[in-house]
Amino acid sequence: MLGLCAAIVKLCASSMPTNVNAEAAWNYHEVTKHSYTNVRTNPHFLDFANQPLPFKIYPALEPSRMPTEVRQTGVAALSAIAGSVPAQTNAAPDLEAVAQLLYLSAGITRQRKYSAGQIYFRAAACTGALYEVELYLVCRELANLQAGVYHFAPAEFGLRRLRAGDYRSVLVEATGGEPAIAHAPLTIVCTCTYWRNAWKYQARTYRHFGWDNGTMLANLLAVATALGLPAKVVCGFADATVNRLLDVDSQREVAFSLVAVGHDSGFSAQTAPPAQTTPRTLAEISPLAFETVPLSRDEVDYPLMREMHAASSLGSAEEVAAWRGRTRLGSTEMPNLPPPAGSVVPLQPLSDAEMPRDPIEQVILRRGSSRRFARTPISLAQLSTLLDRATRGVPADFLDPMGTQLNHLYLIVHAVEGLDSGAYVFHRDRGVLECLKQGNFRDQAGYLGLEQQLPADAAVDIFFLADLRPIFDRLGNRGYRAVQLEAGILGGKLYLAAYAQRLGATGLTFYDDDVTRFFSPHAEGKSAIFLVAVGHRVKRQSQS
Ligand SMILES: Cc1cc2nc3c(=O)[nH]c(=O)nc-3n(C[C@H](O)[C@H](O)[C@H](O)COP(=O)(O)O)c2cc1C
């Protein structure tokens, strides 16, 4: 009898989806931590002769150019980042809106020469300016754009059509019937390419996937809102199906997130009769085998990342639907911060009438990571507006109900008028900052931000910390993708909120365990996920 039970347990374990067992995510997180010692003992160096191309190029496919004129929405950036269009609003983008969405999230907005060549800076911040996130469109026929699967080519500002026809039903199948995807005229698929970022950051790149995809999504969501389009981030999908639809080599490039754009209440790709030519299942999707230009002479493989990706992959529509069923977080399952025990300072955000009204497109084009901060103070109203506007909720399948947040924000305040210097934790639900300790922590902040000057000089450093245990309990290994992606989105919103107020900002990396230690005992058990520094930037001579 005992033997039979053991056999059944073994059978169940072997058929249990790997996503549920979060050992892989814990292991990946632990192994990729930065510490004072491992940063110094890592022999890695940048081989500029083998630097990967920043673009994916299909030499056999001619891109069709998109309109380059930036349509002025006139919507204030601080409104666009804080709000979203109700999910059921009927709206579909036309080609001009598609161009606007792509340009302001992943387009080339600036370029600069340097000793080894040219850097093409993009609309959203990205670690190392290496731009490992590619965008694809899966759409029905839109005004001035035929139904198809397209790759966005930022260098030409064009679209390469990979498949002709309406393939949305494949995404509906892959997402287990996710309603936003089922009703969306357009879904943007974001993929990440390992080597393009791992050339510099090695195995830590899998974290960067979430960060860099997230900053891009902050822009994309804000622009969609400004254009009157509902948009929703979807992390739950059968990986192999989406990868096959795009025909990416999943050893090198993998789908990371989807964004449903627009809504058509009269149509559901799920219930629509399939067109004769449209496949619905993995086996029916034909390979394309388009040639792409190699990224560099050699590629170094970091198997740990592929293992992490495989362990967080979902295998079938049923598994995806079950995963999504677990994303609805209750207060007991996703514990909030304990009530404040120390002194608190209420936020004083600017109202709609008082806030700067610079439109979202202007703010995105103005944004660029600050390379130096002046040690001059920002106001409490500016800091409050940043925090308030950036944390009003992200429409995402893993943040249910809307307004759920996986990351907690911890601050080191150096120079904010009306706020004592010190360490704080942000209670979003109460709109207050709780002081954890007072003092001048500029040196410690510089150290925590990987011994860089930027976090020491900023007016405030905003750290994201998450309790990974309840996240992994609910979302499995895929919770690791979700927590990094959420951090990137919130970080991207903080960037935009800073630039909307004519402040500067930069993402930064950090010494993981030292960050947790600094904010402990309050942060005990949490993991450091992300860091953004904000302040007055010292402009370069050529910068306006
Ligand atoms: C998550 C994240 C982490 C970053 N970390 C650092 C950092 O540690 N040091 C730094 O100088 N810049 C850092 N940056 C800034 C990038 O280098 C910058 O975004 C990139 O060069 C592109 O330039 P841009 O933001 O001006 O468009 C980071 C950016 C992001 C999004």
Image (tube, rainbow, N blue to C red):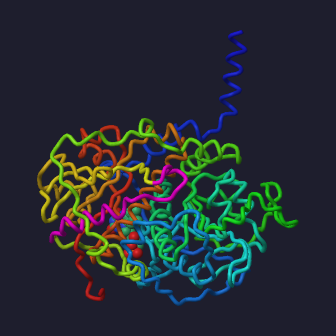
Instruction: Note whether residue 23 is visible.
Output: yes
Query: Is residue 89 left or right of 110 when viewed as pictured?
Result: right
Task: Tell me where residue 314 appears, x and y as whole percent.
Answer: 64, 47
Residue closest to the far right: 276
Instruction: Note whether residue 297 is visible.
Output: no
Query: On screen, 425 above or below 491?
Result: above
Q: Nearer the viewer, residue 224 or 266?
A: 266
Ligand 1, by image quadrant, is: bottom left
Task: Tell me where residue 244 appears, x and y as whole percent.
Answer: 73, 60
Where on the picture, by quarter, is residue 179?
Answer: bottom right
Where on the picture, by quarter, is residue 233?
Answer: bottom right
Query: Is residue 295 left or right of 505 when viewed as pictured?
Result: right
The residue at 29%/45% (across/down) is: 516
Query: On screen, 392 above or below 423?
Result: below
Q: Nearer the viewer, residue 218 or 392?
A: 392
* Quadrant occupied by the C terminus: bottom left
The residue range painted magenta reads 376-402
The residue at 76%/69% (across/down) is: 166
Q: Nearer the viewer, residue 49 or 215?
A: 215
